[in-house]
Amino acid sequence: MSTTGIRPQIDVRRSGDRFATKIDWLDSKHSFSFGSQFDAANTHHGLLLVNNDDIVRPGSGFETHPHRDMEIVTWVMQGSLVHQDSTGHSGVIYPGLAQRMSAGKGILHSEKNDSWRLSGADAHTDPVHFVQMWVAPDESGITPGYEQLEIDNELLSGGLIPVASGMDKHDGESAIRIKNRYAALHVARLQPGQSVELPDAPFVHLFVPRGDVALEGVGPLSAGDAVRFTAVGGQKVTAVEPAEILVWEMHATIAR
């Protein structure tokens, strides 16, 4: 991991320019190269390798599959997602609950929209909309792990909340810990007119999964838009309508 040889840059990536996977049960948009869709010039930003914006229909989902040496953070925007893995962890992820899975030396897991199985007063058949982000760990071959915590109340402040972090400065502040001491994910839920200031870091990734915002020095951003900052930071983001933003603060990048 490195920060050498970087030059200031603000790179705006629009929603419609993302890679896409659309099949009968999944509508997925990929900010970076993913699976068979590969662009050598678009493999990562800083330490972030995957930013998948997924919608899964009820009764469907990702069957059991393997991961290795990756910190995987899942953030649900709408609906609920059922997680099960080979370490014995299982649970339901929903809006306002942060989840981290450390793949480490190897893990199997599944993720499904099981809303159709519910009955009675809780019955619903809604799609689940979530963003899944993969960050490279700073050490390979660790013991796989899992962590989740609800932070819905903290998000009511409208501020930029550290949700997942491995950085010392967020020790005791972030909801969950990731195994990379150079990276942190922040989330903000903003009402019209509310603003937050982006972190000042060598690498910052801003993603707008919901709503419209205005970015200082750039202009309007809509749902699905992203901005990659290199060696610049501190810009103000202001909500034009109710919005949510996901911000990665990164103090290193993957060495090419």
Image (spheres, rainbow, N blue to C red):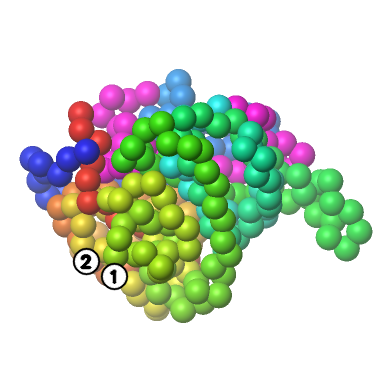
Q: Nearer the viewer, residue 120 or 65?
A: 65
- Position of residue 171 measured from the top left corner of the image (x, y, whole percent): 36, 64
Residue 81 falls left or right of residue 103: right
Q: Secondary structure at mark 2?
A: loop
Cα separation, mark 2 vs mark 1, equals 6 Å
- Tally the marks: 2
> Circle 2 sits on which residue?
234
With 8 as the anchor, is 172 left or right in this view?
right
Q: Which residues are magenta?
A: 38-65
The reply to whether the C-beta atoms of the residues labelled 2 and 1 are less than 8 Å apart is: yes
- Residue at 32% over, 25% down: 39
Vertical arrangement, residue 72 with respect to residue 168, above or below: above
Residue on which disc 1 sits: 197
Q: Is residue 58 magenta?
A: yes
The percent coordinates of residue 85 (x first, y second) are 63, 37
Quadrant holding the C terminus: top left
Q: Residues within 10 Å of mark 1 (few under 14, many from 20)?
A: some
Q: Amino acid at mark 2?
A: Gly
Out of 254 and 203, give the one closest to the viewer: 254
Q: Amino acid at mark 1?
A: Glu
- Image x and y of residue 73, in percent: 48, 48
28 w.r.t. 154: above or below: above
